[in-house]
Image (tube, rainbow, N blue to C red):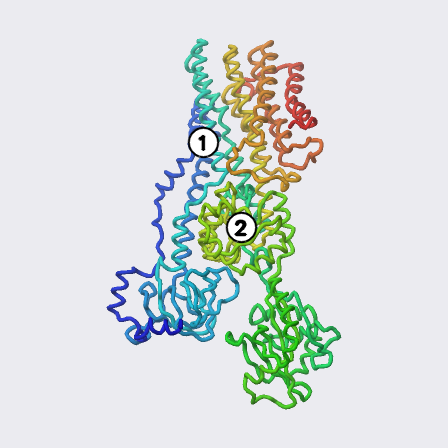
Amino acid sequence: MLKEQKQNQFEGREQGLSQSEVNQLLQEHGPNTIESQSGKSFFVYLTEALKDITILILLFATVLSSYVAFKSHPDDFTEPIVIFSIVLLNIYLSIRQQKNAEKSMDELKKMSVPTSRVIRDGQLQEVESTEIVPGDLLQLKLGDRVPADAKILSCSNFFVDESFLTGESEPSEKNAEARSNPEAPIGDRKDSIFSGALVVTGTAQAVVEKTGMHTEIGKISSLINNEAANVAPLQIRMQKLGKALGVVAITAGVLAIIIGVIKGLALETSIMTAISMAVAAIPEVLPVVVTISLAIGMSNMAFKKTIVRTPSTVETVGSVSVICSDKTGTITENKMTVKRISPLANLSETVFNVTYNEKNNLLFLFYLASTIDENSTAGSNPTELAIKKALDETFSKEELQKISSNFKQIRELPFDSSRKRMTVLYEINGQYLSVTKGAFDRLNLKDSSNTESYLIEHDYLANQAFRVLGVGYQIFPTNPIEWTDEELESDLSFAGFVGIIDPARRESYRAVKIARQAGIHTVMITGDHLLTATKIAEDVGILTDGRKAMSGSELNQYTDEELASIIEDYRVFARTSPEDKIRIVKAFQSNGEVVAMTGDGVNDAPALKAADVGIAMGGGTEVAKEASDMVLVDDNFATIVKAVEEGRRVYSNIRKSLYAMLGCNISALTIVLISLIIGWGSPVAAVQLLIIKVVADGIPGFSLSVEPTERNIMKNKPVNKKDSIFSDGLLAKIIDISIVFTVVTLLAIGIGRMTSVEVSRTMTFLVLGWSTIVHMYNCRSKESIFKLRFLGNPVLVTTTVLGAVILLLLVLIPQTQTILGFVNIGFTNWLWVLFLSICPLVYIEIKKMLHKF
C-alpha cells in the first residue's frame, strides 16, 4: 500500500524537476543552508562584560588604590596595577565564554555538503547543495553525505551513519518499503534519510522533503540559537557578594567622613580614613583567589581526563545534583560482547566437536558462520567483532589455526537485511557442511518439535536485553555447490544461541553508587531501545528505590508542567529526540536541580547548552564539544563523578578563602569605625592595611585554594544553586571570628596607647596581621589542626611563614620603620602581640573540640 502511495505521489517525476521549478522553489523555500546569528562586535562584548558587578567593584578598587598610592607612595603603583590586571582577566574570560556559544553554530555549518548529484530535466547533474529544493531527486552512493532530509524511493543494501542525530553507534539500515510514522524517533524512520548523514554502503534514490532550517539538523540549529547559556551559580553568588561589599564600602566611607566632621577632624584626614575603610571593605585579592582556585581545578580535572572549557564550570560541576548520562560508551563499554552461550544440542558427535566443552563447540560454530579475518583485531561489524573477541578469549591463536585448518571454505551467502541471516559452506574430511547464523525466527529448522523450548530460551535472553543470535547447520555427503541459497539454508539442525550486549563499564557500578551517596541522581537518556536501557540501568544501580523508565513516545504525552511534576520518579528515558532531551533537562531544572548532561552527537548539542553543565565526549562531534562546558577525554561516567568531587573541593576552598579574608576585612572595618567613635583616630594607615591584606590575608588565602579534598566530601548533599555563598552557617562563622579579631586588636590598641600612639599603631599592625595568618589554619578544615597533617598543604605553610616574617621585618628594619611609621614596641608588648595573635586559633580550636564549629 505504502509503495503504491509513493509511486502515485512521484509518478511522472522520474525526469526530476525542471530548472524553472527549481527557481520558483528556491524563492519559496530559500537556499538549503543553516542560518546562524550574526556575530557581535567587540564593543558589545565589552559593554556586556562591564555590567558584571564584580568588575565594577574591582574598577572602583583600582581607583581607590591608585589614589592611596599617589598620596602615600607615588613611586609604587604595584597594588592598582595588580587589581587592574584582574579586571582585564575577568573581562577576557567573560568575552571568551560568550564567543564559545557561537562556535557550535560554526561547527554545524561545516556539516553542510558542497555539491550533490540530482536528476533535473531528465539528466543526472552535480549541483551546489545550497540550491537543492524540496522535490529534487537525489542519487546517493557509498561515501556521499546526505544534503537534505529526504524520503527513499528505492535502495539496495543501503546503510547510513546517522549517529550524530540518534546516538546509536551502528549504521542504520534503510528500507524504501518501510512505513514509518513521521512523528517516530529518527532512529525508527527506516524509509527516511536526514541531512548530514553519511552513506556507509549501498545506493539509493530519494526525493527531497525538507531543506535548510526545516531539516532535522536545521531544527537543532534553531534550538541552539534559542537556548540561552546558563549563568554559573558561582557567578551569581559572586555578583551578589560584590553588590553587598560595594554597599558596605560606600556606607563605611560616608560614615567615616560624617564621624570625622563631627569629631572636628580635617576634611582631608576624614577622606583618607574613609578610603582606609573602603579599602578594608573590599577584598581586592578575592577574585584572584577565585580565579586561581578555578584554574587549579581546571588543571586537576585535565589530569583526571576532563577538559573544562570555562573556569566557572569547575565550581558548577561540584554543585551538580542530577547527571543525565548517555548509555553507549559512557556507562557501557561501547563494545558488543558475547555474554551468554546457550548450547541446545549435543555437538560431541559431529564435526564441530573441537573441545570437550559444549559452550566452546557452539562458539566455534558461530565462528564458522562468520566472516572474520583471523589476523585482524576488528570484525566486519560489531556482531562479528564480539564473536571474534569471545573466540580469542577461549582459544589461543595456535589452537584456532590448528582447528580451522580442517575447514575449507568454498562458498558464502553474505548477510542480507531481508533474510536476516548469513551462511558459509565448508568442506571437511570429504564431507560438506553449511553453517547458518541469524535471527531465530529466520532459521528454517528441519525439526520443529523442540521449537517451544528454543523459544523459551530465546525469550529469556531477549528479556535480559541481549541481542540474540541462533545458529544451525546441515551436513551433506556430496558437494552442494550447485544448490540454491534457499536449499542451503533449509532443514537446519539447531545448535544454540549466543547473547550479545554492550556491557556496563566495571567502574560505572562504583561511580553510580558514589554519586548516590553524594545526593546525586543518575539519569540515563539514550536513543537505544527501552528494554536494553532498562537492563543496563538495573545492572549499574540507576533504577533503584522504585524508580521507573519511560520512552520518548510516552514522554510526548505530558505537558512541560506535568513532566516536571513526575520527573523525579524516572531514571531512564529511551528512544529520545533532541527536543525530548531539552525537556528532560528543563524539567529537572524547574525543580531546583543543577543538571549535568552528557552527549556526543549533533542531536545532543541543544541539551548540552541548556544544561547547567554540558559534558561532551572526547570522541564525539565538534558541534557537541563546542556547545559543551567540559569534555570527557575517556568518555567514562566514572570520570564525571571524579570531576564532581574536584568541583566540590574547589568550591569548598573558595569558601575557606572567603572565611579567611572577610573575617579580616570586617574586623578591620569595625576597628577603624570604633576607633573613630572613641576618638582614637585611624588605628592603621591605608597603606598598612593594604600590606596586611596582601601579605597576611591575600597570599596565604591563595594557599587555601590548593587545600586537599576533605574526607567524606562525597557524602554531603549537593549545594542548592539558590543557596547563598554564605549558606550552611558561613556568615555566622565570619561574624564570629570578626568579633574575636576586633576584640584582640582593640586590646592591642589600648595596651599600645598606654605607651604612645605610634606603639599602638605598630602593635595593631602586628596583631591584625599575625592573627589573620594564624587564622588560616582554622580555615583548613572543620577538624582540629592537630588531626590534620601539618605539611598536608605545604604551600600554606610556606606562605604563612613568609608572610609572618615579612610583617616582622617591616617593623624591625629601620628604613621600613621610617617609611611606614612604625616604632620599637618593647619586650612586654612583644609578648602581648604574640599572645593576642594566637587567641583566634585557641578560640576556634575550643569550638571544634566542643563540636560547635
Mark 1, residue position: 58
* Residue found 50% across the figure and 67% down from its top: 171
Camera sees residue 634: no
Q: Quadrant of residue 728?
A: top right
Q: Amino acid at mark 1?
A: Leu
Horizontal and vertical percent for residue 71?
A: 44, 21
Quick check: 119 above or below 613? below
Mark earlier in primary sequence (2, 1): 1
Mark pair 2, 1: CA separation: 37 Å
Image quadrant in which the N terminus is located: bottom left
| Relative side of 819 to 107, left or right | right
* Residue found 36% across the figure and 53% down from its top: 36
Q: Amino acid at mark 2?
A: Cys
* Residue found 64% across the figure and 71% down from its top: 497
Horizontal and vertical percent for residue 598?
A: 52, 52
Horizontal and vertical percent for residue 599?
A: 51, 54
In this rendering, which labeled residue sits more in front, label 2 or label 1?
2
Considering depth in this image, is 757 or 180 the residue closer to the camera?
Answer: 180
Mark 2, residue position: 324
* Residue found 63% across the figure and 39% down from its top: 708
Quick check: 55 above or below 325? above
